Image (cartoon, rainbow, N blue to C red):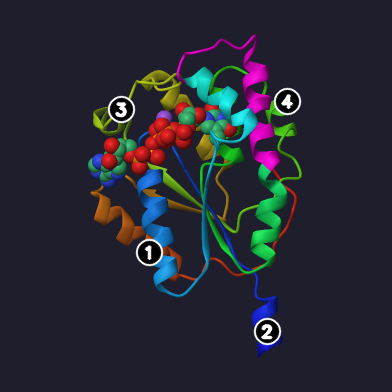
Amino acid sequence: DFQKTMMKRGAFIVLEGLDRSGKTTQAKKLADWLKSRGETVHLMRFPDRDEPFGKVIDAYLKKEIELASPQALHLAFSLNRWQKAGEIRSLISLGTYIVCDRYCYSGVAYSIASGLDEKWVKCADIGLPQPDIVLRFDVDTDVAAQRGGFGDERLECNELQKKVLIEMKKLTDERWKIVNANDSMEGVHNQRRKQEEMGKMEGEYSYDIEK
Ligand code: T5A
Ligand code: NA
């Protein structure tokens, strides 16, 4: 039994969706719920604004600095993830559950929606640890626009958000679960819990991204 415990891997759970779809709120609720079941949980988010490349991203999003090209911004988002790739792998292999607020799918969807080439944007993230499950938070753009803080940062405009949703739908495969994020905070949490109870976190862990 001891050996079994030592070998039990964690799971990598990613939350994706438009701005103000409630991912940060639900990531915390999901982490607390997993902890209440006795799991070790590590919350992560991208962009990770404390990491060196994340500081550049943060300053750009807050309109404090300019970047010379959308390609540079895209690569900064990707570098920000690569800086954490080793940590993700080791935490999971040690049995920790990672609940991750945005990942490479945001990277791909926002950059394509902003006009970058689809093939090119997908390259930078090839080889990152793959999630076991992706929860896609679908929110109506009008509902999102009503929520606290919308429009403060770059990329938060309805036109772009609609394009992002189209791109995110294209990335959706059998590992993804759709959450109705128009619901109340508790309502969303309970939907999420139901899906998770379906036992979607088993299975092989692979290090390549297909898309
Ligand atoms: N981006 C990101 C890229 O372009 N490429 C990339 O590779 C990556 C990783 C910043 C931007 O960067 C882009 C995407 C973004 O435009 P971010 O730091 O995740 O990304 O953005 P944040 O502004 O921190 O977070 P979001 O806008 O995505 O918000 P969340 O996390 O979806 O929503 P949350 O939980 O913070 O809630 C927002 C507000 O709504 C309320 C909350 O209290 C809060 O005020 N709320 C609800 N209200 C009513 N009903 C509910 N169910 C609610 N849930 C939350
Ligand atoms: Na945002």
Report the residue at 40% width, 22% height from top: 156
Label total for image: 4
Classify 10 Å Cα crowding around label 3: few (below 14), some (14-19), many (20 and above): few
The span from disc 1 to disc 3 (Cα, nearest Å) is 27 Å
Residue 23 lies, in percent from the top left, at 40, 44
Q: Which kind of residue does numbered mark 1 sit on?
A: Arg
Image-based side of 19 in relation to 55, left or right: left
Q: Do the residues labelled 2 and 1 touch (CB within 8 Å)?
A: no
SS assignment at label 1 = helix
Which numbered tag is attached to residue 89? none
Q: Are marks 1 and 3 in contact (CB under 8 Å)?
A: no
Mark 1 or mark 4, earlier in chain: 4
Queried on whether the Cβ of the residue with tag 3 lies below 8 angstroms from ligand 1, the answer reads yes
SS assignment at label 3 = loop
Classify 10 Å Cα crowding around label 4: few (below 14), some (14-19), many (20 and above): few
Quadrant housing the C terminus: top right
Q: What residue is disc 3 on?
A: 149
Image quadrant assignment for residue 75: top right
Dominant secondary structure, magenta: helix
Magenta-colored span: 62-83
Taking the image in four quarters, ligand 1 sits in the one at top left
Mark 1 or mark 3, earlier in chain: 3
The span from disc 1 to disc 4 (Cα, nearest Å) is 36 Å
**For discs 4 and 2, the disc positioned in front in the rendered view:** 2
**The one of 51 and 78 positioned closer to us in this rendering:** 51
Residue 110 lies, in percent from the top left, at 54, 27
Q: What residue is disc 1 on?
A: 193
Q: What residue is disc 4 on?
A: 120
The span from disc 2 to disc 3 (Cα, nearest Å) is 46 Å
